[in-house]
Amino acid sequence: MTLSSVFLYVLAGVLLFGMGTSAVFFCAHWLRKILAVNLAGSGLFLVLVALSRRPGAAAADPVPSALVLTGIVVAVSATAVALALYCRLAAFEQERITDESHG
Amino acid sequence: MPEAHATTWLVVPIAAPLMLSLAAFVLGGRWCARLGMAAVMIVVVSTCFITWNIWHRGPQTYPLGAWPAPLGIALYADGLSCALLGMSAVVGAFVSTYSLEYFPWPLGSDDEYRCGAVQFWPLWLLLWSALNALFLSRDVFNLYVTLELLTLASLGLVVIADTRLAVEAALRYLLAALVGSLLFLAGVALLYGEHGMLDIDSLAVEQAELLVGQASSRPAAESDGAMAQDERRTKSEPTAARLIPLVMIALGLMLKSALFPFHFWLPPAHGSAPAPVSALLSGLVVKGSFYILLRLWLDLFPAEVTRPVAMLPAVLGSAAIVWGSLQALAAERLKMLVAYSTVAQLGYLFLVFGLARPEVSSTAGFAESAWSAGVLFALSHALAKAALFLAAGTILHEAGHDRVRDLSGVSRRMPITFFAIGVAGVSLMGLPPSGAFVAKWLLLKASLSAGHAALAVVIVGGGLLAAGYLFRVLVAAFPGDGATTPGGEETRPIPLRPMRLKELTTLVLALASLLLGLAAAPVIELIEIGSPWSSAVVEEP
């Protein structure tokens, strides 16, 4: 019974991961790409957490949770950097538009 | 007791730049460059000590916090780590010295980078710390963390050039790198799911045991004759499930080291960053992910790396050599030319995976020599490419442009820089006595003896193509006597500039790359200390 629920989580995680990674390449808009990377990351974390329930073991393995925590910290900071870059890019675009309308 | 002290040195090249990076960020101003040069001295000295220790005592392990390996996270250095650590120390030291003049403090009259020094030093020291940690880590999850640190630090460095082009390139670089590290992490997660551990040594043992277990349990019910046959089949054809972690890890790291066709993010990012940053990214950072793949390839997946699997990186590498060189031939700007040259030269590194296969190691020493040659090539390329990017940066700064077509007027003002381009060019083309010459020679010998004539053609052809794009630069810079520049500029005497620190460091880097070939024998001996081949030969029945 537990095995099948683990399988369900892993399957969902793999699906999310696949959707995310393919969307990074196929979506044109930067914001969608940034969201897609986050989606892929969440899928991967879901797989990791699901794998922490080892067959036959009484309690869940704590190491994957620690890994996921580290992964989330990395994902949050990388997303922050990506959004900052996106804002800078939008500012450049704004400058270009105002320059064109004045010139 | 001295033995215990010796391994403690492994902490220094990671901790010192990290501490000084934080200090430089807090203190700011003129302290940035001072703390940066202090880090240079500490990293160079500690790398010398580590090299000495490995040379005399063999591979070194340092358990952090005295926790033993399966639970704790160990630092480990063998010849491979040590060679790349040395590369990071040498290139880092020279690029730092160059940056003293490139990012001046107090600001010069031409404030191209308004607060360049304050932004550059903390990020560069963080990058250095992450890179050294990557070369010394013995834990696959720690490798993931260092990869991400490397990405975030290099990203900050790229956007010091606060232009639209640089920011867009940085965003593309970040997304590609994030997907790459997620794929790597997925592979790590699958390995953990199978074995429940992250330490490379323990994982290697588990992976090997799995192989033996498969080989002995499967044929138990069958006859003796079929047993030997089946054992061979299990060894050469691992199940698809066991290939998945390898594929994930390899794909992620190929994306991060910009192997063709995943190179799309590299030329804009490396071409639009400030010159010292381009030198660090092209010389050092891309070697980080190559190192991880090289390390895990044979340590963790000796059974999965069969002929078809191993030939894929080699084929992509060959395509990279051709495609990168053609793009470099067509590039209009010097920095883009150098960036595409990086795409081409990285292709050579991936030929190693096709040539250094475990199953051919018993026939001759060629697989091993191809493996060492790949590492030697990485060292030589780091020195030469850093020199080329630094030279391109000096030209861009002095002349205000880096159009290859209009270099003739510039070359007379900066003879030393153009001499350095020539010397680094000799190394990139793979002419003697450069380190790349020795490396290409060994790769050529390995590919011919393994029967891969096509790879041999690519190795030689790549050298010719490199000569093509580098001569394009030199011909544009030094037009013949008959040629005239528009406006009759050649009649006006141009005063020579006094030689500056920037030009000197560029020249020394280029010369180091050229002379690496003369020291190739001891360097290869160092690389092979504790290599997977030295143990594989003993275990072979």
Image (cartoon, coloured by chain):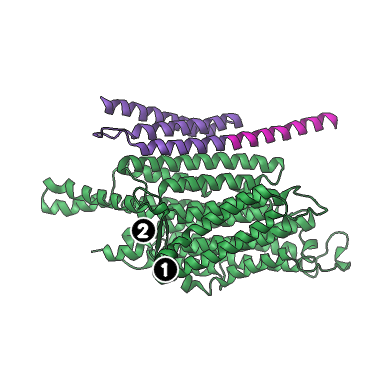
Chain colours: A purple, B green
Gap in Å between the C-alphas at discs 2 and 1?
38 Å
> How far across and how far down the image is residue A101, in percent?
82, 28
Is A101 within the magenta?
yes
Tell me the chief SS of the magenta region: helix
- The chain identifier of the residue carrying mark 2 reads B
Q: Amino acid at mark 1?
A: Pro
Say which residue appears at 47% left-offset and 65% top-offset.
B50
SS at mark 1 in the image: helix
Q: Which residue appears farthest toward the front when viewing the image?
A: B1
Q: Residue at x 43, y 67 (%)?
A: B54
Task: Please tell me which of labels 2 and 1 falls first in the chain.
Answer: 1
Q: In the rendered view, does B58 fall on the left or right side of B125?
A: left
Q: Is residue B518 left or right of residue B163?
A: left
| Quadrant where the image shows the C terminus of chain B | bottom left
Q: What amino acid does circle 2 point to?
A: Arg
Query: Badge 1 sits on which subunit?
Result: B
* Front label number (2 vs 1): 1
Location of residue B526 by image quarter: bottom left
Q: From which residue to which does the magenta span run?
A: A80-103
Residue B307 in view in this figure: no
Residue sitting nearer the eye, B179 or B7: B7
Tell me, yes or no, if residue B58 can be seen here. Answer: yes
Q: Which mark is residue B357?
A: 2
**Do the dots labelled 2 and 1 sit on one chain?**
yes
Crowding at label 2, few (<14), some or many (≥20) Cα neighbours within 10 Å? many
Residue that numbered label 1 is attached to: B2
Could you say which is closer to the camera, residue A26 or residue B296? B296
Residue B62, how many percent across, how many down?
41, 58
- Which residue corresponds to the image point at 74% horizontal and 54% vertical from the top-left? B402
